[in-house]
Amino acid sequence: EAAMMRAKAAGGGRFEFYTSGMSTLTRDWLALENRLRQALDAGEFVLHYQIQTDLRSGRPIGLEALLRWRQEDGELWAPARFLSITEETGLIVAVGNWVIREATQQLRRWIDAGVTPVPVSVNVSARQCMDSHLIDVIAGALKEANVPASLLKVEITESTAMADLDHLRQLLLQLRQLGVAIALDDFGTGFSSLAHLKRFPVDQIKIDPSFIADIHRDPNGAAIVRATIALAHGLGVPVVAEGVENEAQIRFLREHRCDIVQGYLYGRPGSPDAIREVLTSADVPPHYLHPESHS
Ligand code: C2E
Ligand code: MG
Ligand code: MG
Ligand code: MG
């Protein structure tokens, strides 16, 4: 019925539109939406995790949970292929709640397997933050998995922050009170990064890959990264450089005292088993881990 309504809206309310003249694009979209509605119950979502490395010590000090959708043929789809549909349909709330529970339960599984855990960051979107149950979902998930709140981080982006600012501020304060840290993701890509920094309690700033990509060649990009690191340190929070792919970038980031790096150079997102091996073998060479192949 939701699909009909959507098609109706797209077709300006003419029933004939979705019986005969419906575009291939619309039909694909509706098919995808229907499959997504069932994917959660069918257990088709999985989380992969990407290592965050302390630049000074070279040790893993965090993980980011990244959503994947397992297809029938075994292929894992990245969020770019389906996330916007879950956001438009509101499915993101249920999917996001699943992500939170799964990440906390995975922490519990690693702990039970004897692994010394590192904090896991989960991404939350605007729709999730506007859901009044989010704080209870997070508190409940931590309790059920018997995992300390200090092992969980929530990543918000500026588009998340674009929603109801007062509500979001309240939510972030509640998260803090719970002991859950907050990271500001994709920093610099939106319209009002600085305003958000002033307004929201933030424990970590993540520099978007678009600024990291050619820092060693582009003087403007380099200036922005330097300024962002200084800004973060001025605020007393560590900074994460995302999308680190080569040694030249590392040299620059080290020279300018970036705290944490995340990128293919240090490891692609990997399955819980692959991550367990990394966390248990203390001296993993940085280029070693490539569990997730190019797609
Ligand atoms: P993000 O939160 O900024 O996550 C980082 C993205 O950069 C991930 O893409 C990661 O695989 C990719 N990446 C990491 N290192 C490198 C690198 O060295 N080079 C390049 N080219 N890419 C790198 P992914 O997994 O495809 O996720 C894309 C976006 O989807 C995420 O961006 C996040 O905004 C969103 N997302 C992922 N999982 C979730 C989730 O569970 N819930 C919500 N609401 N959003 C999610
Ligand atoms: Mg993120
Ligand atoms: Mg990011
Ligand atoms: Mg992003």
Image (cartoon, helix red, strand yellow):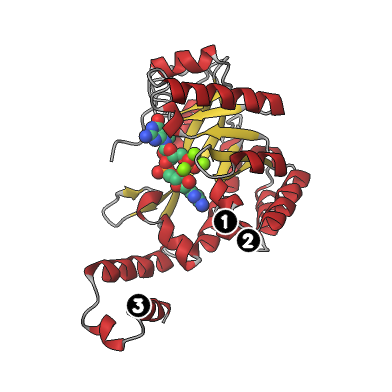
Residue bearing mark 3: 7
Residue wearing tag 1: 126
Q: Are marks 2 and 1 in contact (CB under 8 Å)?
A: yes
- The foreground one among 76 and 155 is 155
Secondary element type, mark 1: helix
Residue 60 position, x and y percent, is 54, 25
Q: Answer with left or right where residue 37 lies relative to residue 163.
A: left
Label 2 amino acid? Met
Q: Decide: few, some or many residues near mark 2? Use Cα within 10 Å; few <14, some 14-19, many ≥20.
A: some
Instruction: Tell me which label, 2 or 3, sits earlier in the chain.
Output: 3
**Can I make out residue 269 in this image?**
no
Residue position marked by numbered label 2 in the rendering: 130
Q: Quadrant of residue 111?
A: top right
Q: Amino acid at mark 3?
A: Ala
Mark 1 nearby-residue class (10 Å; few <14, some 14–19, many ≥20): many
Q: Determine the secondary structure under disc 2.
A: helix
Q: Nearer the viewer, residue 9 or 80?
A: 9
Residue 241: which numbered mark, if any? none
Q: Earlier in the sequence, mark 1 or mark 3?
A: 3
Give the residue type at disc 1: Ala
Query: Which part of the image, by quadrant, shows the C terminus?
Result: top left
Where is the N terminus found, in terms of image quarters? bottom left
